[in-house]
Image (tube, rainbow, N blue to C red):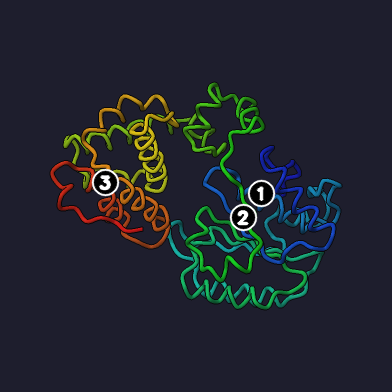
Amino acid sequence: MQPQPEAPYPWQQRQWQQLLLGQQTGRLAHALLLVGPVGVGKSRFASLLAAALLCQAPSASGIACGSCKSCQLLAAGSHPDLQEIQPAEEGKAILVDQIRELERFQGLKALYRNKVVVIAPAEAMNINAANALLKTLEEPTAETTLLLVSPRPQSLLPTLRSRCQRITFPPTAEAEAVNWLVAQGVAEPVRMLAIAGGAPLAALALANGDSMAQRQQAFREWVAITLGREDPVEVAGRWANEGAGLRLAWLYHWIGDLVRSKSQLSLRDPTLADGLHDMLERVDFSEIFSRLDGVQRGLREVSAPFNTQLLLEEILLPWAPTRRSSSTRIDS
C-alpha cells in the first residue's frame, strides 16, 4: 500500500468529511464497512484512510503527509501497524488462519499512532473466517481500526454488518464525476458513466483500452444465444476465461435495459436499443426477473471458490431458444 497525499476522488468528499469529523471528535467507529459497486474507488479510499490514520502529521483536511517516518514505512510496504488481509490468490477464500493472525496483531501495542487492518474483499471470507472476525468485532481494541471493503455486502453475515459503521459509495452521475472523466481525457463522459452504471473508474476503463470492444462482443454473444446462433456452453467457457465477473456485471445491466426497453423507458446505453428491441419477441418476460436474480447470485458467487464455467452455464442456458422450457431456474 502506497501513501497517497492527494485527496479522495471528487465524488468521495462527503464520505471523507464524515470520517474526518468522526476522527476529530473521537467518534470514529472501530470497524468501517466500505460498500458500493465495483469502479467507484472504495479500495483507493481505504488506502487513503489507512494512510491518514497511520500518519504522524496529517494535514488539516485529514490527508497523510507522505513524509513522516510512518508514511515512509507505509511507502516501503513495511509498516508494523498495518495489516492487509486478502485472498492468497484471486478467486480464493480468506481463511480462518488469516483472521486468527488478526487477533494476534490486534493484541500488540501500536508502535506509532494507530493500527489499521484492511480486509478486501470482505465477502471472500469463508464461514469460519467470518465467525472468527465476528469475535474480534465483539472485543475491539481502542487503537485498532478495521476497514472492510466490499462490493457485495449482502454476502456478509448480518451479524458482521451490524457491528460495522457502513460507509456507502453509491453510483454517481454528478458533475464531479463527469468533470473528473473529462480531465482524464474521456470523450463521452456522460455516456461512459451511464454505461458503467455510475462507476467512474469503470467508465474510465471502458473508455480506455479494449474494454468497450470486449463489452460489445459479449453483448453480441448474448444476443446470438437468444437467436440459437451461439451455444451457451461455449460462450460460458469463453466468459470464464475472459473475466466472468465483469461480463456478469454487463449482463445485469443489459437485462435491466431490456426491461426498460419493454417498458419504453430510456436506456442506460442507447446504442444497444436495436439489439434489445429485436430480443423482446424472443424473451419470456414471465421469467425475466428470475433470470436477473440468477445474475445477482452469480455476481455474489463468482469470486468464491466455485466452478465458474458451470455457474455461467446455469445463467446463460435459459436464454437459448431450444432449452428455455426445460432449463433450470436460478433462485436468488
* 2 vs 3, front mark: 3
Q: Position of residue 206 (x, y in %)?
A: 48, 32
The residue type indicated by label 3 comes to: Ser
Q: Residue lying furthest left in this view?
A: 322
Q: Position of residue 90 (x, y in %)?
A: 45, 56
- Report the residue at 55% width, 21% height from top: 187
- Report the residue at 71% width, 78% height from top: 107
Mark 3 and mark 1: span between their CA atoms?
41 Å
Residue 88 in view: no
Q: Which mark is residue 281?
A: none
Mark 2 and mark 3 lie on one chain; the one further toward the N terminus is 2
Mark 3 and mark 1 lie on one chain; the one further toward the N terminus is 1
- Report the residue at 75% width, 51% height from top: 18
Q: Which mark is residue 45?
A: 1
To which residue does mark 2 refer?
34
Callout 3 environment at 10 Å: few (<14), some (14 to 19), or many (20+)?
Answer: few
Q: Quadrant of residue 221?
A: top left
Q: Is residue 210 left or right of residue 306?
A: right
Of 329 and 284, the residue lying toward us: 284
Q: Which mark is residue 286?
A: 3
Q: Residue lying furthest front in this view?
A: 263
